[in-house]
Image (cartoon, rainbow, N blue to C red):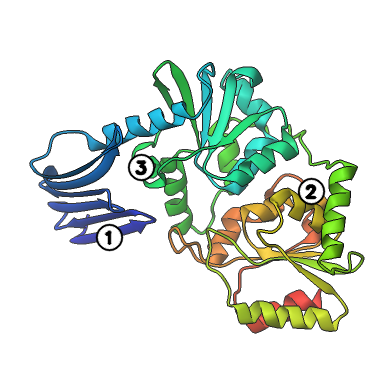
């Protein structure tokens, strides 16, 4: 207990004052609540229900707004899936977690008694569909429209039975947030992959899915690279973006690129002009891969290319880069070859350039 505690994670803010006698909770612009002696005293809520916007200011509120918004989310999910489908898996996690799901999908389906013909996977990102096509082309996946704030605020469990549908949430928010707090406050974390395996009961030794693009897809990507003027026999693949960690300055990438070009390499910068599948095929022809630590980098491990991975503090909770590396090192992922993985948690730009460039 303390006089003042403050916690900010993404859209969520919690403040406790005077040993929790006064507490404030705010979630984005949809919810504000003040409690006195742990009892709700004042609340402002703003949310849409049945296509009507509700702006409500209350003293001594009693209605469960979280439950109302949860029901709205589940209704919107169900409405975007064919009516005959009984089971829906809502992916609320990132690309890396979705990659792991694909590797262990058979175990996930068996563990939840799901069948391919009566299950739809849905999410908010188009590139999740690319992953399913890479590893599990028989899966039905659909990108849906859903308010992310509503989902994060109200949908926190692993499973919901709602309107005669079974809705599974992969992976629930409380697991992710709790784990991030744990990682930030410990020096010897259990690796993230192990925690996900334990959460779902995955057997880590039973990974059968692997990416194997057909020859036509390879030819199309090679033609695209040639049209971009790339020397496909001598280039380095660079992925400079990541959603969950701090970016590095453009000057860093310019300096690194300059060093590598002096050594005779062409440079491919990953961009939105290439789908994640096209980018992965492109990386398979490279002499090596350099990138910010991201879920996309996990999907490149099976290419067995030298990988230079840069860690910076996490945006979700400002976890330092050295702790982030301990908990999320690529070395402990499926298909990893530790002899090909070089990881850099020290973000001093001159040292990074020297270490990375020196290994090519």
Please name whichever residue, 318 or 249, is drawn nearer the observer in this view of the structure. 249
* Left or right relative to 6: residue 211: right
* Left or right relative to 298: residue 55: left
Whichever of labels 3 and 1 marks the residue nearer the N terminus, that label is 1
Question: CB atoms at circles 1 and 2 under 8 Å apart?
Answer: no
Where is the C terminus found, in terms of image quarters? bottom right
Question: CB atoms at circles 3 and 2 under 8 Å apart?
Answer: no
**Mark 2 highlights which residue?**
302
Q: Nearer the viewer, mark 1 or mark 2?
A: 2
**Mark 1 highlights which residue?**
6
Counting from the top left corner in percent of width and height, residue 115 is at 63, 18
Please name whichever residue, 272 or 338, is drawn nearer the observer in this view of the structure. 272
Name which residue lies at 47% across and 46% down. 176
Whichever of labels 3 and 2 marks the residue nearer the N terminus, that label is 3
Where residue 68 sits, quadrant-wise, is top left
Say if 138 sits above or below 340 in the image: above
Whichever of labels 1 and 2 marks the residue nearer the N terminus, that label is 1
**Mark 3 highlights which residue?**
150
- At mark 2, the secondary structure is helix
Counting from the top left corner in percent of width and height, residue 58 is at 10, 44
Name which residue lies at 83% across and 54% down. 221
Name which residue lies at 57% across and 40% down. 196
Name which residue lies at 34% across and 43% down. 153
Quick check: can you spot residue 284?
Answer: no
**Residue 275, which numbered label?**
none
Say if 324 sits above or below 174 in the image: below
Question: CB atoms at circles 3 and 1 under 8 Å apart?
Answer: no
- At mark 3, the secondary structure is helix
């Amino acid at each position: 207990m303390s006089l003042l505690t403050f916690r900010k994670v993404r859209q969520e803010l919690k403040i406790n004052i005077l040993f929790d006698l006064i507490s404030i909770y705010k979630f984005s612009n949809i919810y504000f609540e003040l409690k006195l002696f742990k009892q709700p005293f004042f609340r402002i809520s703003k949310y849409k229900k049945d296509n009507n916007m509700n702006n409500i200011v209350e003293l001594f509120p009693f209605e469960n707004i979280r439950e109302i918004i949860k029901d709205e989310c589940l209704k919107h999910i169900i409405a975007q899936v064919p009516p005959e489908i009984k089971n829906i898996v809502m992916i609320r996690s990132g690309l890396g977690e979705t990659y792991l799901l694909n590797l262990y999908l058979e175990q996930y389906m068996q563990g939840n008694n799901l069948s391919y013909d009566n299950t739809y996977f849905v999410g908010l990102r188009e590139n999740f569909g690319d992953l399913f096509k890479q590893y599990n082309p028989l899966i039905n996946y659909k990108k849906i429209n859903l308010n992310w704030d509503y989902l994060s605020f109200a949908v926190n469990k692993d499973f919901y039975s709602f309107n005669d549908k079974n809705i599974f949430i992969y992976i629930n928010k409380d697991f992710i947030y709790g784990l991030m707090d744990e990682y930030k406050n410990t020096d010897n974390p259990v690796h993230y992959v192990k925690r996900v395996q334990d959460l779902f009961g995955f057997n880590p030794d039973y990974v059968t899915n692997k990416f194997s693009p057909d020859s036509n897809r390879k030819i199309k990507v090679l033609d695209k690279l040639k049209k971009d003027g790339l020397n496909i026999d001598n280039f380095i693949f660079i992925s400079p973006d990541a959603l969950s960690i701090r970016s590095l300055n453009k000057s860093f990438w310019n300096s690194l690129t300059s060093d590598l070009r002096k050594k005779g390499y062409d440079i491919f910068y990953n961009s939105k002009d290439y789908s994640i599948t096209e980018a992965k095929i492109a990386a398979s022809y490279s002499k090596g891969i350099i990138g910010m630590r991201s879920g996309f980098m996990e999907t490149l491990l099976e290419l067995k290319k030298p990988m230079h991975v840069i860690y910076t503090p996490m945006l979700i909770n400002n976890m330092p880069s050295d702790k982030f590396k301990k908990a999320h090192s690529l070395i402990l992922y499926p298909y990893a070859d530790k002899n090909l993985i070089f990881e850099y948690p020290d973000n001093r730009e001159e040292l990074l350039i020297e270490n990375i460039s020196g290994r090519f």
